[in-house]
Image (cartoon, grey):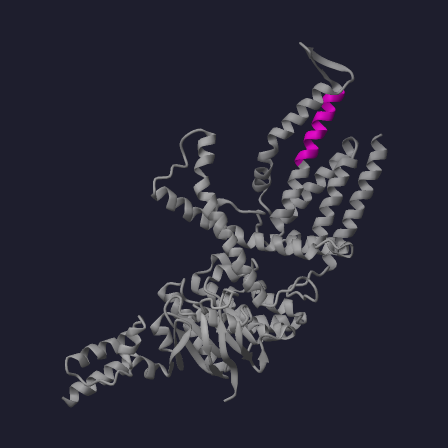
Amino acid sequence: MPEIIKTESLCFSYDEEEGAQLVLSDIGLSVEAGDFVAVLGHNGSGKSTLAKHFNVILLPTSGAVYVDGMNTADAERLFAIRGTAGMVFQNPDNQIVATVVEEDVAFACENMGVPQAEIRARVDAALEAVGMTEYARHAPHLLSGGQKQRVAIAGVLAMEPKILVMDEPTAMLDPSGRAEVMNAVKKLNREKGLTVVLITHHMDEAAQARRVVVMERGKVVMDGTPEDVFSQVERVRELSLAVPQTVELEYALNAHGANLSLRDLSVEDCAREIMKYLGAD
Amino acid sequence: MLKDITLGQYFPGESVMHRLDPRTKLVALIVYVVMLFVAKGTASYLLCAVCAAVLIAMSRVAPRLILKSLKPVIVIVIFTAVLNMLYTPGRELVSFWIFKITAEGVYNGVFMAVRIIMLVAVTSLLTYTTSPIALTDAIEHLLSPLKKLKVPVHEFAMMMTIALRFIPTLIEETDKIMSAQKARGADFESGNLLRRAKALIPVLVPLFVSAFRRADELAVAMECRLYHGGEGRTRLNVLRFSRLDAAAAVLVICFVAGVVLLNRVSL
């Protein structure tokens, strides 16, 4: 699989001065096209700052970021990069521009100068992809949080990006809204082959990704499949993060003499593992 | 409490008035207002009144709503009418103390009142039948020749759209902040005007701070969706004149001709 995002010894500091505190230090990360990567870390670990580099909201202090082969420092490719890596933010209210859902979804296309007939087609496809077709003519402020965030995702999808970068898209949503958004994102990744970079601090969301990158103080400290990362329970806890509840349960049972794999992230798998252990006993 | 505020007072519908292009409606309104001031004599005014009645009937907006829109101006109407009655020189009808009411004054006052009432009724008909966003679009289109003079027409229209989009959000936020301040013992209801105004400061400050933060985030989100001003922009919903608009234009011309003719007749 080709690399669609690549960072080379990326360093970043909000202060221009020499020797200022680095928010990101020496990050070399590459994301394959079609992958679903969750970036985990507690507050201040630099995960949002990293995401902002994929969309040229921030530029590296040193090092380089390549999006689909384009260097983000290249000012002439700014729009091409932003059109390739669409960004969804935390607060759905602050990224919806228009007073009608479909007008908002069309916003990016209108900016790109897409012909009118094609905008229509793209807007309908984007709303369909996130399951919001029936709300096309609604006013955004009357929608629920999960619905608003799905409209925001549709607004980015209408640009037809190759990558969807999401900066804690579920942080302000209730559990059902979170599930709505996660299901929509998983479907896009599975069915349209969209590369997804999900910044989150919810372990359960990270567990649904194909790859988990854990950050701490501006560095990548763990990187692997969710099973590989979360099975290292002590290491994850050292980083003041929690593991998913299923792993937590297996870990607690292991402490009492059980011998479970710690690699079961879904409730079903976890139940099966415990049944197997009990049956074998 | 704050949720009851609706700006623009748009009532969705499918009537002829709703289906007209907003540009047509806006231009027709301007013509109508001008004609209200051009009109002289009973016959012309009757034509204006009949037109207003027909428009209201066609819009299928409940007459009750039109009457409601007149409520805030009733004081102005009465005030203007009374002033006209008292201060128009002419044949004296009644006089008491330093006031005298003249026949011309009564005539002027009544016409002035009718003029203002029709002005407000027809103007509110426009906002009742046109969504704010369509109205913004129409204004942007009609003012687009000014772009040549470097007037930032698109930017103004964009600002208006965003303002309309954020009114409900900010109202909700104000409600939330007021509840939070009430929970900590703030009192917004008692005291004189000055005290109540002062009590609003702890609401306004956080509201402004949050509005600026929102603006900042929105600007970033807009840039991420490739916003770069009005140049080279296309639209999802393009305004189109239909046969309906042509018919409306013909009617507007007939109306203007009618008023001008009737002005002559009654002179």
Q: Quadrant of residue B120?
A: top right
Specify whether B143 is left or right of A234. Answer: right
> Residue at position x 49%, y 65% from top?
A14
Residue B186, placed above or below residue B111 = below
Task: Return the x and y of residue B111 as percentages of the image width and height.
Answer: 72, 29
Q: Nearer the viewer, residue B124 or A108?
A: A108
Specify whether B49 is left or right of A264. Answer: right
Q: Is residue B115 magenta?
A: yes
Residue B7, placed above or below residue A184 = above
Q: Quadrant of residue B102?
A: top right
> Residue at position x 48%, y 82% from top?
A31
Residue B14, placed above or below residue A251 = above
Task: Return the x and y of residue A102 as percentages of the image width and height.
Answer: 56, 65
Q: Is residue B225 magenta?
A: no
Answer yes or no: is residue B131 visible. no
Task: Return the x and y of residue A40 as percentages of the image width and height.
Answer: 38, 73
The stretch in magenta equals B104-117
Exactly how many numbered labels are in the figure? 0
Question: Magenta part mainly helix, strand or loop?
Answer: helix
> Residue at position x 77%, y 47% from top?
B252
Residue B60, placed above or below residue A87 = above
> Residue at position x 54%, y 60% from top?
B218
Specify whether A126 is left or right of B80. Answer: left
Answer yes or no: is residue A232 visible. yes
Q: Point out the residue furthest to the front here.
A: A18
Task: Return the x and y of residue B129 as percentages of the image width and height.
Answer: 62, 50
**Quarter in which the C terminus of chain A is drawn:** bottom left
Q: Point out the residue furthest to the top here.
A: B97
Q: Nearer the viewer, residue A247 or B83?
A: A247
